[in-house]
Each structure stands twice: as structure tokens, then as C-alpha cells.
Image (spheres, helix red, strand yellow):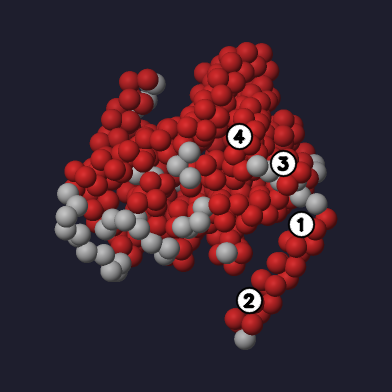
Amino acid sequence: MIRRIAYHFLTRLLTALLSFGVVWLTARYLGAAGRGAVSLFVTDCAAVLLFIGLLGGSSLIYLSPRYSSWQLLVPAYGWALAVCSMGTMTVGLLRPVSTTYLTHLWVVTVCQALLSTNTSLLLGRKRETTYNLLTISQVLLLVGGLLVAFVGNWQRTVDAYYYAAYLAYGLPLLLSLGALWQLPDRWRTGQSLQQVAQELAYHSRGAHFSNILTFINYRLAYYFVAHYANVRALGILSVGVSLAEALWLIPRSTALIQYVDLVHATDKQGQLAPTLRTTRLTLLATGAGLLVLCALPTVVLTRLFGPEFGAARLILWYLTPGILAVASNIMCSTYFSGLERYRVNNVAAGLGVAVTVAACFWLIPRYGIYGASLAMSLSYLASALYLLRYFLRDTGTRLRHLLPGPADVAYGVALWRKWLLVQQGTKV
């Protein structure tokens, strides 16, 4: 399990570094206003794609051992196309945007939705190497496209991001279809398409509702900043948030493997001990990363992104407690998802939404982007505390069982050394 987590972590680390490249390129060559416009487009894409999971998402992983991939693919694809179309029209109704913008939004979201469906099915069949390669390729192609446009002085506008996104999601989509075709799946008789769709919808509603609420916690502040301030302020906020959220690659890597193993395990209770140890190591690594990130001087940020982005350092400080809270949040919510205890996750996310809405209305008009970062932290803390309470009660553990200690540090170092030795042996 540790080796699989390491590979997933390295995949997400490379993805995070490449994503940082996207943030750097758009901030450096487009400025705060251009970076804000890109952030708003990315947020619109995420908002549309959010509803894809109501008939897909993690439930595709959950049901993949029971059904043929092709039987799951048909309802998931149909729903994805419908959601992208309706979501794009909704954005056009809610905000004054151009037809060209809506066209870009529809094409990019469709490619992302179909690609996400394919990769979820591949991961459900434990094609983890293929999943990791497809994940890396998306960001690699996006960075490559932006490098050609910006550094090559071809087009230094927000439009360059749209065209790079076509390449980044379109080509991996075609490759993922080829990977699905190679699976030894056949259309299983005795299971109607309606039956498959109904079960997929049943599991997706409970599993994904918390994801919708979580997105509101993560990104509602962006729309408030765009409304009460401007896209330039949003660009500065997005850089600080992107740097802080890069640390989430640690809990997300470990939680992904935890979820897959929990779904396939016959003895669910037997997964508790590995979960506790993994959680302690995750919190330890996330905390260390936060210390490094917060120690960055302002001059580093201004030299990296430009003179407009020095304010991002204070944003990092306001986000610090929330980012650490999310690390435990992800681990606990993954545990309850694997046990189909979706209600706990939904209530926790709902509590976070209540805090988010109240904090955004109160803090952002008064304190701008700093109020936005503080509102996000308060929301993360509220959700994490609720989940932690139920996790401890449900598992019969105590808080000290989740807090890393000297033994965990030694264990983590030993694992790292062991993994390095394995890699050296593989190269030989």
C-alpha cells in the first residue's frame, strides 16, 4: 500500500508542480487582471463539472467491480453532456459573458467531464499507472501550450489559455478511450441499462452531494471577490490560494488509495489501523509543508509572479489553519465514503457552507481578499471539527491516535529510505 501511495503522491507532486507552472505563467504574462480572468473561467468550469458527479464521479469507482465499464459509461456520458450544456447556459444567464466565452466553456467542460468519467473507471479497475499518466499528461499539455503561446510570443492573452485547455483535455480523452478499449470487459447480460443507471444515480447522489457543498466552501469566495472588488483582486487571491492548496496533494494522494482499498476490502474494520497511521503521516507531512510555505518572504512572491502579487503572502497566513484542517477533513470524509456513510460528510459540508456564506457576506465587503481567505479558513475548520468528532466516536479512537509523534516521524523516514532503496534497485 505504501508503495502505491508513494507513486500516487509523486504523480500528484508532479501535477502540483506543473499546476504551479500554469499559475506562474498566467500571473507573470497576463498580470493580476488576466490571472483573475483565468481563475474565474476555471471556477466556472469546476462549477459546471460539479454536477457531473450526481451520476458518476467516485461512484464509478465504487461500482466498477460489479458492472461492465461500458454499461457504466453509457449513462455517465449521457448525463455529462446534458450537464455541460445546461451548466453553460446557466452561466450565460447569471453573468454578462460573450458567446465566445460560453463556447470555450462548453467545449472544455465536455472534454473534462468525459475524461474524468474514463479515468474514474480505469482507477476502479486498478489501472493506477494509466490513471497517473493521464493525470500528469493533462497538466503537462496545458503548461506546454501556455509556454508556446506566452514564451514564444504567439499570443499573450486569456484566449491562449482556452486553446491550451483544448489540447490539455482533448488529447488525454482520446488516449483514455484507447485504455478503456483494452479492458477485458464485455457487456454483461441480465443487467439492463436502466438498472445500472438507477444504481449509479443512487450511490452518486449520496456520495457527491458533499462534493457540491465542499466546492461552495472552496470557491464561493471567488465570486464574492469578483463582485465586491474586481478580477485583479481575484487574481492575487487565486495565487495565494493555489500555493496553499498545493499542499492538499498529500492528503488527496493517501485518501485516494485509502478509498480504493476500503471499497474492495471485505473486512472494513481491518482498514482502521492503516487509516490511523496514514492520517498521522499525512498531517505530519502537510504541517511540514505549511511551515516551509509560510516562511517564504514577500520578495520571493514578487519576483516569481510580479510586483502585484506581494499581498499573497498574508493570504497564506490566513489560510494556514484551514489548510491543515482540510488534511484531516479529507482523510475522515474518505473513510465515511468508503463505508457509504455519506450523511456524515454531507452534514459536515453543509455546516461549512453555512459558515462560508455568513463569513463571505460579512468579511469580504469589509476586508477584501484577506476577508475571503479568512472566510475560507473558518469554513474548513467548521467542517473538519464536525467530521473529526464523528470519526472519533465511530471508530472508538481518541484524538491522540490521530496526532503524529516521534514514532511516526521515524516510521515516515524509514519508509522514505525503503522506497529510495527500491527505486535504486529497480534502476539497476
In space, the residues marked 1 and 4 are separated at their CA atoms by: 24 Å
Horizontal side of 305 relative to 33 (left or right) equals right
Identified at 42% across, 39% down, the residue is 207
* Residue tagged 1: 408
- Using the numbered discs, state the Cα–Cα distance from disc 4 to disc 3 in whole angstroms: 11 Å
Q: In the rendered structure, which amino acid carries the disc numbered 2? A: Gln
State which quadrant residue 274 falls in: bottom right
Give the residue pinned by disc 3.
398
Of residues 249 and 317, the one nearer the viewer is: 249
Marks 2 and 1, the one that precedes in the sequence:
1
Local secondary structure at mark 3: loop
Residue 291: which quarter of the image? top right
Residue 19: x and y in percent read 55, 50
Q: Amino acid at mark 3?
A: Arg
For marks 2 and 3 on the same chain, the one whose residue lies earlier in the sequence = 3
Residue at figure coordinates x 34%, y 55% from the top left: 64
- Placement of the C terminus among the 4 image quadrants: bottom right
- Horizontal arrangement in the rendering, residue 10 relative to residue 40 (left or right): right
Measuring 71% from the left and 67% from the top, which residue is drawn there? 416
Name the residue beneath numbered marker 4: 390
Residue 257 or residue 400, whichever sits in front: 400
How far apart are the two marked residues, 3 and 1, measured between alpha carbons? Answer: 17 Å
